[in-house]
């Protein structure tokens, strides 16, 4: 009986936390709309972008400097784009390079040194190599599924309980309406780029104050 009551209590507590978090999100959305108009972005809002046009990225340290928030919390935050200084090309990123080497050039993960690198750098903590290999086998499955379907699934399709496009490929909108990678969803973005998909779902990140006129375009699937 005690165990049952504990489980019920945990579920109730979890529900209240979720409700509290959602309430804060909706309040934030309303403030955005009041301050910047009806075109203002929503927190974790889903947008649709052309991955072939994503050639640069903003790392989490720069997001933190500009917005004061961790990149996972900086979704839908409107900023003065003149404050953004550090934008890097994604072509030099190791994760992009090894994804192209594997899925485009046909080299194995081992041949590219990926498994050893992840193990040595503790990218996944103390995972044994067997578990790391299983992780990359899952990525291969995701690649083949996306290739078969001809599209990337939304986060809601992956998990119906997911809130909007939370944990999706993070994409910032620059002052000219350009799309810039936010660092979350490297492998999914690489899959989309290798397969040359025309449009993919993404989670909106920072938005330049003078680029909200472009948002309606990105809201269309």
Image (cartoon, rainbow, N blue to C red):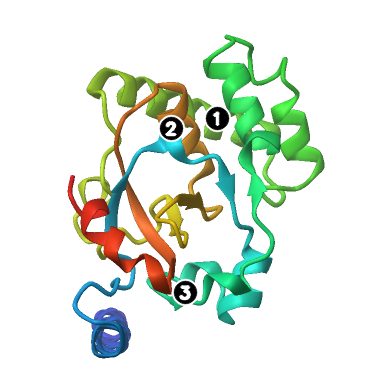
Q: What label sits on residue 214 in the rendered view? A: none
Q: Residue 58: give x, y in percent of width and height.
A: 60, 57
Task: Find disc 3 in the rendering and name its residue.
Answer: 73
User: Is tag 3's residue or tag 2's residue first in the polypeptide sequence?
Assistant: 2
Q: Within 10 Å of the Cα at label 3, are there few (<14), some (14-19), or many (20+) other Cα atoms? A: some
**Can you tell which quarter of the image residue 135 is in?**
top right
Q: Secondary structure at mark 3?
A: helix
Question: Marks 3/2: CA distance?
Answer: 26 Å
Q: What label sits on residue 52 in the rendered view? A: 2
Q: Residue 43: give x, y in percent of width and height.
A: 33, 72
User: Closer to the camera, 84 or 182?
Assistant: 84
User: Which quarter of the rendering shows the C terminus?
Assistant: top left
Left or right of 218 on screen, residue 172: right
Question: Marks 1/2: CA distance?
Answer: 23 Å
Q: Residue 90: give x, y in percent of width and height.
A: 62, 40
User: Closer to the camera, 136 or 182?
Assistant: 182
Query: Residue at the spot x=48%, y=76% of the render?
Result: 79
User: Which quarter of the rendering shows the N terminus?
Assistant: bottom left
Q: Secondary structure at mark 2?
A: helix
Task: Find disc 1 in the rendering and name its residue.
Answer: 136
As drawn, 194 above or below 28: above
Query: Residue at the spot x=40%, y=31% of the render?
Result: 192
Q: Secondary structure at mark 1?
A: helix
Viewer-nearest of discs 3 and 2: 2
Q: Is residue 188 visible?
A: no
């Amino acid at each position: 009986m005690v165990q049952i009551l504990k489980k019920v209590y945990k579920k109730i507590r979890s529900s209240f936390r979720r409700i509290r978090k959602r309430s804060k999100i909706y309040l934030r959305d309303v403030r955005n709309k009041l301050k910047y108009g009806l075109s203002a972005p929503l927190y974790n809002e889903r947008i649709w972008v052309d991955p072939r046009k994503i050639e640069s990225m903003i790392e989490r340290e720069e997001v933190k400097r500009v917005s004061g928030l961790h990149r996972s919390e900086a979704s839908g935050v409107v900023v003065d784009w003149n404050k953004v200084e550090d934008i890097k090309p994604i072509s030099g990123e190791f994760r992009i390079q090894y994804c192209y080497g594997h899925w485009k050039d046909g080299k194995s993960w081992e041949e590219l040194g990926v498994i050893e690198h992840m193990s040595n750098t503790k990218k996944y903590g103390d995972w044994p190599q067997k578990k790391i290999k299983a992780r990359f086998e899952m990525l291969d499955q995701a690649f083949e599924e996306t290739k078969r379907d001809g599209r990337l699934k939304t986060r809601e399709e992956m998990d119906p309980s997911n809130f909007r496009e939370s944990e999706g490929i993070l994409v910032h909108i620059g002052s000219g309406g350009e799309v810039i990678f936010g660092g979350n969803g490297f492998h999914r973005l690489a899959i989309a780029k290798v397969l040359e998909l025309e449009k993919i779902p993404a989670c909106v990140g920072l938005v330049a104050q003078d680029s909200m006129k472009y948002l309606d375009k990105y809201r269309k699937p």
